[in-house]
Amino acid sequence: MNRSLLMPVPPPRRTAVRLGAAVLAVVVALLIPAAPAWAHNSLKSSTPARDATLPSAPTEVALEFMQRLDPTFTTIVLTDAARRKLATGEPVVAGAKSTVQVTDTLPNGRYTVAYRVVSADGHPVQGSYPFTVADPASSAAPVADARTTTAAPTAAGPAASPSAAATAAETGGGPGAGVLVAGAALAVLVVVAAGLRWRRAPAIARTDGDPRRADEPDEH
């Protein structure tokens, strides 16, 4: 057989390459807009600090986040050891920082700061953390800790509910990474299937009207 007449059929390969490129373009288009959603906003610093023991009662609570906040959807709640909501001023937002004034002097005891904020891009974040006031000069009776007393729990109202767990982890919404990973896996499967189909497609060798497989050995 004259090897110069062997003519592999290229269309399946071109189709697989084009299909793979199209799928890759779709995956990239999905991942690029979703990338900012992975950079979830989170608490950067706080005053009082998490688990801090203060020698005097604080007059304000200041929280600084990684991204700018939406002032309309920023909430900071302060509760005492009995899980009662304490009076504070309205949150004042400046960029990525939010501050509330503590209206009353806090007696010695354990307190919890609970927050729920929304970034400027619409991503919600909530969490809480504890701190303790231990002023040796304070004459006010410390608040009994609800965790160690058998007294009936005091109603704290809807806004105090985030502080039930003293060290709750921050949580947020936004598109889940699982959806994007599943999409990428599907794209890989499509590309692999197209490649297998191309490998199985026979290359046709054309002679004088007698088509043969291109990999058939030459008998001459």
Image (spheres, rainbow, N blue to C red):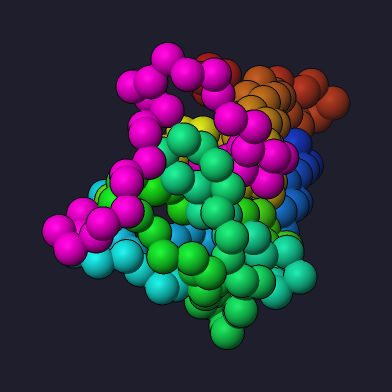
Give the position of the N terminus as an image quadrant. Answer: top right
Residue at left offset 58%, top offset 48%: 85
Question: Where does the image place residue 142, in percent across and percent down from the top left?
Answer: 32, 44
Quick check: 167 above or below 139? above
Position of 142 with respect to 198 (left or right) is left
Q: Residue at x 32, y 53 (%)?
A: 140
Question: Horizontally, is 10 left or right of 111 in the view?
Answer: right
Q: Say whether residue 5 is visible.
A: no
Q: Position of residue 75 (x, y in %)?
A: 64, 60
Residue 124 vs residue 203, the one in the foreground: 124
- Report how many numbered discs are placed on residues in the image: 0
Q: Is residue 111 left or right of residue 180?
A: left
Q: Which residues are magenta?
A: 134-163
Front-most of residues 205 and 172:
172
Residue 140 in the magenta stretch? The answer is: yes
Residue 198 location in percent, x, y?
67, 30
**What residue lies at 66% left-to-right and 21% top-to-bottom?**
200
